[in-house]
Image (cartoon, helix red, strand yellow):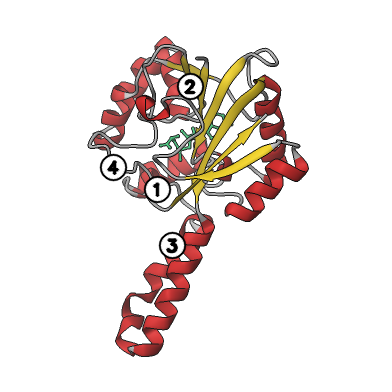
């Protein structure tokens, strides 16, 4: 079975038939032999560990441009926590490309942070605050659940560097938005289903969970679970659309 794991980050799959694709700055540095050596000397701590541990089985490609596969050639296209990082118009074009490369009957499995879960958690904490005013102490945690990522200016890894390094990195690489770290839109089961069905013309759209899928033996690919078999990205929405 031919499967694309788009915007894979470090969550790749080695199984036969799977192509992992991403376009992070780390991967682009690793692609060039000189920059790879330079980066290994400049990066420190957690970042060096991440850079060195990135798997080699990743195709480096900017998916906002296109998906480098023939039309009707792929059985499954999977992407997790990637769609929300694309501007809405880019996201629509990207999903059109996904449909182009899928064979008829092929499945697109989309995982995104679930806006509904975040909003329900926030509203439920409002109720707790009404019942017990002491709960207000931690209420900002719930506001952060909705807003922190979108309003954050500085990329999270840069914010942990020395002041000089922060200045240089922000100048060279830009803020969190320019680096694609912040979400550009949020999805729930209604707007994502509408987008897939009405705007992109997918025939069957189903909400799934991390263990259910219409894809044959999906659990064997291990992309929605961690090493212990637990849900890899809690508070996610799982939607599958068939071409
Ligand atoms: C939040 S991470 C999710 C990584 C992984 N799928 C997971 O669930 O852990 C988003 C990933 O999407 C990738 N990405 C964002 N825009 C991309 C683009 N235009 N082309 C390829 N990859 C992209 C980023 O490099 C990053 O690795």
Q: Which mark is residue 28?
A: 2
Which element type, helix, strand or loop, lies under badge 2?
A: helix
Mark whose residue sits in front, 3 or 2: 3
Residue drawn at x 45%, y 71% is 122
According to the picture, the residue beneath numbered tag 1 turns out to be 156
C-beta proximity under 8 Å, tags 1 and 2: no
User: From this viewpoint, is residue 8 visible?
Assistant: yes
Q: Mark 2 CB in 8 Å range of ligand 1? A: no
Image coordinates for residue 140, horizontal then vertical, percent? 40, 72
Q: Is residue 86 above or below residue 138?
A: above
Q: Is residue 138 above or below residue 65?
A: below
In-image side of 127 versus 176 (left or right): left
Q: Nearer the viewer, residue 226 or 105?
A: 105
Mark whose residue sits in front, 3 or 4: 4
According to the picture, the residue beneath numbered tag 3 turns out to be 145
Q: Is residue 22 above or below residue 213?
A: above
In-image side of 123 versus 10 (left or right): right
Based on the displayed image, in which of its 4 quarters is residue 126 positioned?
Answer: bottom left
């Amino acid at each position: 079975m031919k499967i694309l794991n788009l915007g894979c980050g470090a969550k790749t799959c080695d199984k036969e038939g799977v192509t992992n694709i991403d376009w992070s700055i780390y991967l682009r540095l690793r692609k060039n032999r000189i920059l790879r050596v330079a980066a290994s000397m400049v990066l420190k701590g957690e970042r060096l560990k991440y850079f060195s541990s990135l798997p080699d089985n990743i195709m480096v490609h900017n998916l906002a441009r296109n998906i480098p596969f023939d039309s009707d050639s792929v059985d499954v296209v999977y992407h997790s926590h990637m769609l929300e990082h694309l501007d809405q118009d880019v996201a629509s074009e990207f999903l059109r490309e996904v449909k182009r490369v899928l064979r008829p009957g092929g499945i697109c499995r989309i995982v995104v942070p679930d806006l509904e879960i975040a909003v329900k958690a926030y509203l439920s904490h409002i109720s707790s605050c009404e019942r017990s005013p002491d709960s207000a102490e931690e209420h900002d945690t719930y506001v952060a659940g909705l807003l922190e990522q979108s309003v954050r200016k500085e990329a999270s890894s840069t914010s942990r560097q020395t002041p000089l390094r922060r200045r240089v990195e922000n100048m060279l690489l830009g803020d969190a938005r320019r680096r694609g770290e912040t979400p550009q839109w949020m999805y729930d089961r209604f707007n994502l289903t509408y987008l897939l069905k009405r705007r992109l013309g997918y025939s069957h759209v189903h909400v799934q969970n991390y263990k259910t899928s219409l894809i044959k033996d999906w659990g064997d690919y291990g992309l929605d679970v961690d090493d212990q078999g637990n849900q890899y990205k809690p508070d996610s929405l799982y939607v599958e659309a068939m071409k």
